[in-house]
Every structure is written in structure tokens, then in C-alpha cells.
């Protein structure tokens, strides 16, 4: 399977992936609600990237944050934003974590697993490094949720790539069960990502999702032209504004 190159993507990742204050608060509230963790909790953000979630989880929820990512370039971008040294940034592979068992109360990840060769290994590692009763929270999009979005409608080559790497909610829940997690549940979350169609177009120009960096430049430019035409003809199209995502959680048994 071809891989997104985050050493390259790091230079423009934040441009295409802004989180509005409203969306950030929504995700922080969900994390706080489902984890029931309070300030000081030891939290792991796996595939933390440029710190989109690790930094506000530290600053606003008061979590004792560790961010792990396999891309040095993404971590450099995260560190540049962490002027108060709120987060411990670690270069590493989510499939083989360098932490002893029982190191964290929460393991969080956003849009990580489809980049990994062995997603079940990541979940087994999370199980190992969580304390008994520790919570895993996984934020991602399923094929059902992304197939009809603008990035797949106007960039059909993206569908072929994502069909190979994106997994279903049922598959993820089975992996979690196999890793030993209990109380597994999932919810669909609707997020208004963009205020206008033009903002969505700007994000697509900045290759807002990794799959746009994995198609040929020719396909990318052709898709952009289709999206530009659509936005020009339908400037108020609400379909362009929202994304559907899934949040799946599980718990390590208290007897583990
Ligand atoms: C789509 S980005 C998500 C970044 C961040 N979680 C967010 O939501 O903004 C995926 C991240 O996973 C990282 N990654 C990919 N494979 C990894 C692995 N095996 N172990 C750790 N990080 C990995 C990439 O370097 C990249 O930073």
C-alpha cells in the first residue's frame, strides 16, 4: 500500500486542517465526557502530528500530555507551537511504543490508524500502555462517511486509494475486542468544518486530506478544477460545509 509522506505534508498540514474554535470545543468536550478524566490525567495522543489535539488537551483540559508521531517533520511543527513546553513530544511508531505497561489513563488518536501497516498492533499497544480501566478514544472517518464528500466526488482517484486503507466501524470494533477492550461503542459526529464553500476550496488547494497528496499532480489539478467549477456555480451549497466522522471508544478492564 502506498503511504502518505508526512515529511513533505508537514510543511502545509496546518493550512488545510484548521479547527474552528467551535469544533475544537466540541471535540474537547467529547474527550472529557467519554474519558471522565480530569486535569493531571496522563494522556497519550498517538499520531499527534502537529499537535492539533495534544496542545489544546494540555492547555485547556490540563491533561499531562504525551504526543507520539513517526514523522520528525510533523513533530517539529508541533514543538514550534508549544512555547510553554506543555507536551512531551516523542518520535516513535504507534505499533511499538516505548512506554512501560500502565503508563496512561487515556489513549487518544485522530486519523492515525489508516496510515499504519498493522492497525491491530496499535490497539494492542494501547491496551498494554493503559492502566486498568483506562480509556481508548479513536477519531476517524469510515468509507461510508467520506465516499460522497468533495475530496472523493471531485477527485475520484482518491476513492481507489482510500478503499484500500480505510476501515469500517465494525472492523475497528472487532480489532478492539480482539485486543482485549470492553465497553466498546461508537457514535457518529457531524462537524461543520468550513464556513463557506470557498473555504473548503482553499483547504483542498492546501491538500487538506492526506489522500490528495497521494494522487498524481495531474489528477489533483483536474479535481481542483471540478471543485472550483462547483463552488463557483453553487457558492452556498451546504453539502460542502460539513463532515461526518466517527468516535469509537473502549475501556481496558479494571481486572486486567
Ligand atoms: C492525518 S495525520 C493526523 C495528525 C493529528 N492526529 C491530527 O488529527 O491532526 C496522521 C499522523 O499520523 C502519523 N503516523 C503515521 N503512521 C504512524 C505510525 N506508525 N506511528 C506514529 N505516527 C504515525 C503521521 O506522521 C501523521 O502525523
Image (cartoon, helix red, strand yellow):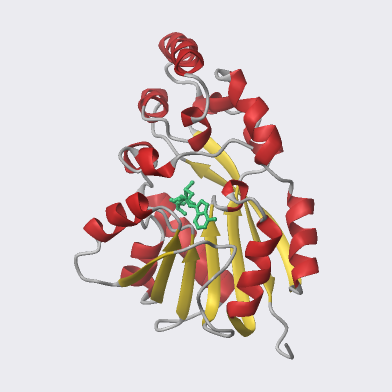
Q: Quadrant of the C terminus?
A: bottom right
Left or right? Give the position of 44 relative to 248. left
Residue 134 appears at what percent x and percent y? Answer: 61, 80
Compared to residue 232, the image places residue 170 above or below, namely below
* Image coordinates for residue 82, horizontal then vertical, percent: 25, 63
Residue drawn at (49%, 28%) of the image? 212
User: Quarter-wise, where is residue 144 in the image?
Assistant: top right
Name which residue lies at 59% across and 26% down.
158
In which image quadrant can residue 225 be found? top left
Image location of residue 246, percent across then percent down: 63, 51
**Location of residue 205 (image quadrant):** top left
Q: Is residue 221 visible?
A: yes
Residue 239 at what x, y percent from top left?
A: 55, 27
Q: Quadrant of the N terminus?
A: top right
Q: Is residue 171 above or below residue 88?
A: above
Can residue 249 be seen from the camera position used here? no
**167 w.r.t. 136: above or below:** above
Q: Is residue 250 above or below residue 42?
A: above
Closest to the observer: 85 or 115? 115
Residue sitting at x 49%, y 37%: 210
Amino acid at each position: 500500500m502506498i503511504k502518505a509522506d508526512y515529511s513533505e505534508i508537514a510543511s502545509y498540514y496546518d493550512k488545510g486542517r484548521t479547527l474552528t474554535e467551535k469544533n475544537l470545543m466540541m471535540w474537547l468536550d467529547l474527550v472529557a465526557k467519554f474519558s471522565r478524566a480530569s486535569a493531571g490525567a496522563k494522556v497519550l495522543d498517538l499520531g499527534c502530528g502537529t499537535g492539533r489535539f495534544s496542545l489544546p488537551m494540555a492547555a485547556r483540559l490540563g491533561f499531562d500530555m504525551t504526543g507520539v508521531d513517526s514523522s520528525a517533520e510533523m513533530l517539529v511543527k508541533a514543538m514550534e507551537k508549544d512555547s510553554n513546553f506543555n507536551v512531551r513530544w516523542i518520535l516513535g511508531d504507534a505499533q511499538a511504543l516505548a512506554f512501560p505497561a500502565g503508563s496512561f489513563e487515556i489513549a487518544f488518536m485522530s486519523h492515525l490508524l489508516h496510515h499504519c501497516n498493522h492497525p491491530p498492533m496499535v490497539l494492542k499497544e494501547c491496551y498494554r500502555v493503559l492502566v486498568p480501566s483506562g480509556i481508548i478514544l479513536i477519531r476517524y472517518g469510515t468509507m461510508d462517511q467520506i465516499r460522497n464528500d468533495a475530496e472523493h466526488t471531485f477527485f475520484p482517484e482518491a476513492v481507489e486509494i482510500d478503499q484500500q486503507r480505510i476501515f469500517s466501524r465494525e472492523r475497528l470494533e472487532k480489532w478492539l475486542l480482539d485486543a482485549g477492550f470492553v465497553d466498546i461503542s461508537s457514535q457518529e459526529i457531524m462537524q461543520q468544518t468550513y464556513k463557506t464553500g470557498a473555504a473548503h476550496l482553499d483547504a483542498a488547494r492546501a491538500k487538506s486530506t492526506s489522500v490528495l497528496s497521494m494522487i498524481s499532480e495531474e489528477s489533483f489539478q483536474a479535481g481542483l478544477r471540478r471543485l472550483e467549477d462547483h463552488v463557483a456555480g453553487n457558492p452556498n451549497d451546504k453539502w460542502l460545509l460539513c463532515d461526518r466522522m466517527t468516535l469509537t471508544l473502549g475501556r481496558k478492564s479494571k481486572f486486567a
